[in-house]
Amino acid sequence: MCVTAVESRPPGALGTSSTSSSRGQRPFGARVKAFVALTKPRIIELLLITTVPVMFLAEQGVPDLWLVLITCLGGYLSAGGANALNMWYDRDIDALMERTSQRPLVTGMVSPNECLAFGIALAVISTLLFGFAVNWLSAWLSLGALLFYVVVYTMILKRRTAQNIVWGGIAGCLPVLIGWSSVTNSMSWAPIILFGVMFFWTPPHYWPLSMKVKDDYARAGVPMLPVLASNKVVARQIVAYSWVMVAVSLLLQPLGYTGWFYTAVALLAGGFWLWEAHGLQNRAKAEVTGAKLKEMRLFHWSITYVSLVFVAIAVDPFLR
């Protein structure tokens, strides 16, 4: 009965009633799933895809598998803590947007205080795990990524500027530095270049999704670029960032960090990205709207692009 009541709650209604917040009326299994959902597992998968291959690049071969496991666990806990704290702060606007209306705090499956405590606990545990089981450079980078996402992006930028995802995306770039530092306990140009790839990847990755759900963001008062600018302006920005991203991705080979395999994959994947980006721009220029704009094609390809490029980073050392 309780599950039915929670799931049938209309979007936009925060689960703050005494009934919804009564711990005894929320099934244990559903509660566990809700706490897992607070960590946003699907987003974390993408972060780990950019962490582990860099460890192979840093090692120029297979890194210590125990180190890989600990780094992945620490990264999951850190990113999960950041995501939980993001949901805690954004629970008001999450209730206004259709795509976030079933998040655990909106439905009442998890209370705000529980979410806050959960997020802080994950932040502390992940930092200590990195510090004592990996190294303290990785620990501070992990904590820095968490604080940047929660404080700089969520609390400061997201509701104030259309550049929110540009600068807020820095938090999602730090896992490449963490992957490198976990192996070497130092920094180098290779992870900095890959940081740049992810920095210029983030806006053209997220803006197509924002174009699709811009009514949601407008309803919640979040100034994502597609809310404030025309599709033509957004598409032009996407193309500009895309060209810089592809150019930066090709710097690894001339600096001696990768060989022919990575370069070939980066060229082919980047070329297809630019084809899709310019296709979106052409449709926007022609004032195509609705489903025919096909903005989500670039969004889905952006995930495939990252996967291909970073898998190539991991494979490349074995082919040199």
Image (cartoon, rainbow, N blue to C red):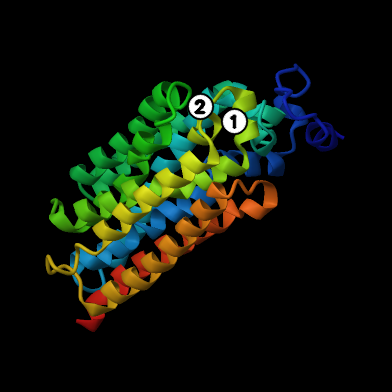
Q: Nearer the viewer, residue 130 or 214?
A: 214
Q: Image quadrant for the C terminus? A: bottom left
Q: Residue at x 61, y 55 (%)?
A: 294
* Label 1 to label 2: alpha-carbon separation: 7 Å
The furthest residue to the front? 286
Give the left or right position of residue 45, taking residue 264 as reference.
Answer: right
First along the sequence among labels 1 and 2: 1
Percent x, y of residue 83: 48, 37
In the rendered image, is residue 229 in sight?
A: yes
Tag shown at residue 223: 2
Q: Secondary structure at mark 1?
A: helix
Q: Is residue 237 left or right of residue 292?
A: left
Residue drawn at point x = 52 percent, y = 54 percent: 282
Query: Which of the image's four quarters has the N terminus?
Result: top right
Badge 2: how crowded within 10 Å, few (<14), some, or many (20+)?
many
Task: Check whether the beta carbons of the residues at disc 1 and disc 2 lie within 8 A of each other.
Answer: yes
Tell me the residue at 68%/47% (across/down): 290
Query: Can you name the residue that lies furthest to the bottom here?
Result: 319
Task: Name the residue tied to disc 1.
Answer: 217
The percent coordinates of residue 102 (x first, y second) are 69, 36
Q: Picture coordinates of residue 251 (x, y %)? A: 19, 62
Q: Is residue 206 above or below residue 254?
A: above
Eyeballing the image, is 145 above or below 228? below
| Nearer-the-camera pick, 114 or 257 | 257
